[in-house]
Amino acid sequence: METKIISVANLKGGVGKTVTARNVGAGLREKGKKVLLIDNDPQAHLSGYLGFENDGKPTMTDLLFNAIQGNDIDFEQLIRVTEEGDHYIPSNKLLSGMESYINTLPNRDNIYSIIFQKEFFSKYDYVIIDCLTFGGALFTNALVASNYVIIPVDAGVFALDGMTDIEENINSAKRYNPYLQILGILLTRVEMTLVADAVREGIKDNYGTLLFNTEISKATVVDQSIFNKQSLLVTNNKPGEEYRQLVEELFERGV
């Protein structure tokens, strides 16, 4: 099976982007798939969620710098593995410095695409990229390199804020990658409220079947999961089961 690259992206923060990236990855791994998680955010929230601590080995910053310079890359040194078995490449604050560097390059939008074509990545069934929450070179590169985008949207009053921006970024990326698809819009932090009902209907009206049937409930166990640096799938809880359902829905959508 050809490696499928999925960006988890929204230009609005606090929507469950990082939680979704990790737990979709865990759900795919649970199904026997080989998954690599990429932290493409200088804030490194995914790295923290996965339990990363600075170990002196290369990170996403080093990968990008060496790829741009044409240096040899020891990809195995980039990979960390959690106790649960998640493979990932961590980030750190230094990644933010790559924005201005990438913008000076003639092929600035295709750097990730070139990297992920390396033979090393073909051993993974899925590469899942946790994107940063502002547009720019890192964000565009992730989209251009991806087959699919999952857009988490929180079920709150300002849920649809930023949807126009993310759509514009996706359409812009399609100039370089016409095969890029929105895999689906995922409603997160859902409660049984009139606001959530209105948000759900608003997304359906505007985006139709792009809205996943699966929704992720708001629950304190999500914060506990982040604090404990464990996926939601290791304990018996509602959001964990919902992420399992989401993985099944991904398969149903042909991913």
Image: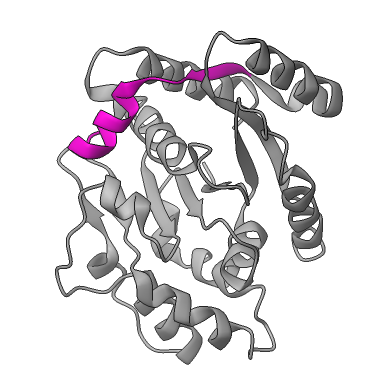
Q: Position of residue 2 (x, y in %)?
A: 54, 46
Q: Is residue 53 left or right of residue 23?
A: left
Tell me where residue 120 sits by quadrant. Answer: bottom left
**39 w.r.t. 76: above or below:** above
Q: Is residue 26 visible?
A: yes
Residue name at image x 57 percent, y 20 percent: 249
| Region in magenta | 213-230
Q: Is residue 6 visible?
A: no
Between residue 70 and residue 26, name the one nearer to us: 26
**53 w.r.t. 159: above or below:** below
Q: Position of residue 147 (x, y in %)?
A: 64, 48
Between residue 49 and residue 221, name the one nearer to us: 221
Residue name at image x 42 percent, y 66 percent: 42
Q: Quadrant of the C terminus?
A: top right
How many labels were placed on the picture?
0
Residue name at image x 52 percent, y 14 percent: 191
Q: Position of residue 236 (x, y in %)?
A: 25, 12
